[in-house]
Amino acid sequence: MVRMPRMISLLAILLLTMVPARAAEEVSYQATTDRFFDLLKDGKPTEAIDYIFSTNPYSVRISDSVQAQKARFVALESFIGKYISHQKLLDLDMGGMYAYQLYIVAFERQPMSFKFKYYKPKDAWVTQSFVFGYDIDRIIEDLAVRQPLRITPKPE
């Protein structure tokens, strides 16, 4: 009988030491984006959009806006076909407090842009906004203007 309280004490100590280690584990904003695309790739756009906004407790305050965006996002497949792939165009981490990611996302009919904004007010990254659109041509032109001009020599 003496061993049982000691065993419980050891178990309690073990659990208490595990809690701070677990809390110290940080989910990166990239992991959030990756999970979003995994859900999209699995044909679960509703779950993907729910997941991306679930990281921010304040999104319930703007639930009408989130629901409208969710409806537009879920309807995408009927307009532009199934998701095919994605490629990151830009990833800006501003001091470990704010991050912006821009992706080109391929669908059967045409590409789209996906923009993720993350904010880290304390210990955890939260989704500040997620925007998707058909403005990929403008984005590519803007990025191209910032690239140094490369002139390819004419073949002789």
Image: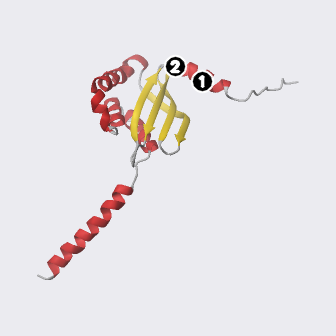
Q: Residue at x 39, y 33 (%)?
A: 40
Q: Residue at x 44, y 24 (%)?
A: 132
Q: Quadrant of the C terminus?
A: top right
* Position of residue 5 in the picture relative to residue 94 (left or right): left
Q: Which residue corresponds to mark 2?
A: 135
Return the residue found at the far right: 156
Amino acid identity at mark 2 = Asp
Where disc 1 sits, the SS reads helix
Residue 11 pos. (x, y %): 23, 70
User: Mark 1 vs mark 2: which is more N-terminal?
Assistant: 2
Using the image, determine if residue 20 lies above or below residue 34.
below
Return the residue found at the far bottom: 2
Using the image, determine if residue 79 lies above or below residue 92.
above
Mark 2 crowdedness (10 Å alpha carbons): few <14, some 14-19, many ≥20: few
Q: Quadrant of the N terminus?
A: bottom left
Distance from disc 1 to disc 2, alpha carbons, whole Å, reads 9 Å
Residue 86 pos. (x, y %): 50, 32
Using the image, determine if residue 118 lies above or below residue 156.
below
* Position of residue 123 in the picture relative to residue 151 (left or right): left
Q: Which residue corresponds to mark 1?
A: 140
* Position of residue 5 in the picture relative to residue 91 (left or right): left
Mark 1 crowdedness (10 Å alpha carbons): few <14, some 14-19, many ≥20: few
Residue 87 pos. (x, y %): 53, 34
Which mark, residue 36? none
Amino acid identity at mark 1 = Ile
Q: Are marks 1 and 2 in contact (CB under 8 Å)?
A: no
Instruction: Say how the picture is coloured.
Output: secondary structure
